[in-house]
């Protein structure tokens, strides 16, 4: 916990010990609960903790977490079938929207946890996604997954879960006001590989400008600037 405190202090992350708890998820039975502190404040012990919609307990491991998510998803899949069978029901694009917001979002919301699942468990998540999309699109069961995903304009769930988990972590570190990269007067430089440096030089040449033409305007305390983010697929650090 001391290392966690140092890490959070370095990245300007705030943890409230009064609102935090600690739980033992090991298979061993503790004869006594040790006193664990964070920033000098003792943490309370709990038998279960809910985080990102998932209830953690000693008997609630990855397999059970997946079964609970699958049970919730199957109930909503049955509701989606009822909507899809109606002759004058929603259009396909509306069924896709319903599937994304009510079924697949169960897994995307918990992506920081689910991305640690084994490959077997992640494949089970993929099956839930393809089953949902087949019902929403109304295609036969033998439709290949690659065609199914292309029609729905989606990527396979296991890949998206890992990508969203990485984005979740990066946003917590680099975007929020407590980040050292935000609201600072110190200059910071982005270390890029030589390949990306070449792409930058080519990009400046195509724009007929040089790096000296780029002006950094100061951010005033009461200003609300409109930020514009440009992502180029050639740069590896944006992948």
Image (cartoon, helix red, strand yellow):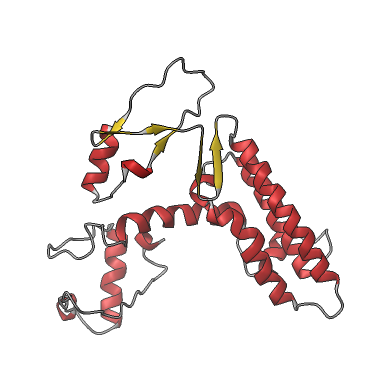
The residue furthest left is 186
Residue 200 x %, y %: 28, 70
Query: Which is more toward the observer, 114 or 74?
Result: 74
The residue furthest bottom is 208
Query: Which is more toward the observer, 217 or 100?
Result: 100
In the visual, does 19 lie left or right of 146? left
Residue 99 x %, y %: 68, 65
Residue 183's place in the image compared with 64, above or below, is below
- Please tell me in which quadrant of the rendered image residue 160 appears: bottom right
Residue 48's place in the image compared with 149, above or below, is above
Residue 189's place in the image compared with 54, above or below, is below
In the visual, does 6 lie left or right of 93? left
Residue 34's place in the image compared with 234, above or below, is above
Query: Which is more toward the observer, 44 or 3?
Result: 44
> Which part of the image, by quadrant, shows the C terminus?
bottom left
Q: Residue at x 21, y 46 (%)?
A: 10
Q: Residue at x 66, y 44 (%)?
A: 68
In the visual, does 238 lie left or right of 102? left
Residue 126 x %, y %: 66, 52
Q: Residue at x 18, y 75 (%)?
A: 211
Q: Residue at x 64, y 43 (%)?
A: 66
Residue 121 x %, y %: 63, 41
Q: How many marks?
A: 0
> Which part of the image, by quadrant, shows the N terminus?
top left
């Amino acid at each position: 916990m001391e290392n966690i405190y140092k890490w959070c202090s370095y990245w300007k992350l705030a943890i409230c010990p009064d609102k935090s708890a600690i739980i033992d998820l090991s298979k061993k039975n503790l004869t006594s609960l040790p006193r664990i502190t964070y920033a000098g404040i003792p943490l309370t012990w709990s038998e279960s903790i809910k985080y990102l919609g998932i209830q953690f307990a000693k008997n609630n491991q990855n397999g059970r977490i997946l079964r609970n998510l699958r049970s919730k998803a199957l109930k909503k899949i049955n509701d989606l079938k009822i909507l899809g069978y109606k002759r004058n029901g929603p259009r396909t694009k509306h069924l896709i929207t319903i599937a994304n917001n009510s079924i697949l979002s169960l897994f995307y919301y918990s992506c920081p946890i689910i991305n640690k699942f084994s490959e077997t468990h992640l494949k089970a998540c993929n099956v839930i996604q393809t089953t949902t999309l087949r019902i929403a699109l109304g295609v036969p069961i033998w439709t290949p997954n690659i065609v199914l995903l292309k029609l729905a304009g989606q990527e396979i769930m296991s890949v998206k879960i890992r990508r969203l988990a990485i984005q979740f972590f990066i946003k917590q570190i680099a975007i929020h006001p407590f980040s050292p990269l935000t609201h600072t007067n110190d200059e910071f430089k982005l270390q890029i590989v030589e390949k990306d440096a070449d792409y930058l030089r080519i990009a400046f040449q195509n724009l007929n400008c040089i790096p000296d033409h780029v002006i950094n305007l100061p951010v005033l305390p009461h200003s609300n600037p409109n930020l514009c983010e440009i992502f180029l697929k050639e740069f590896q650090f944006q992948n």
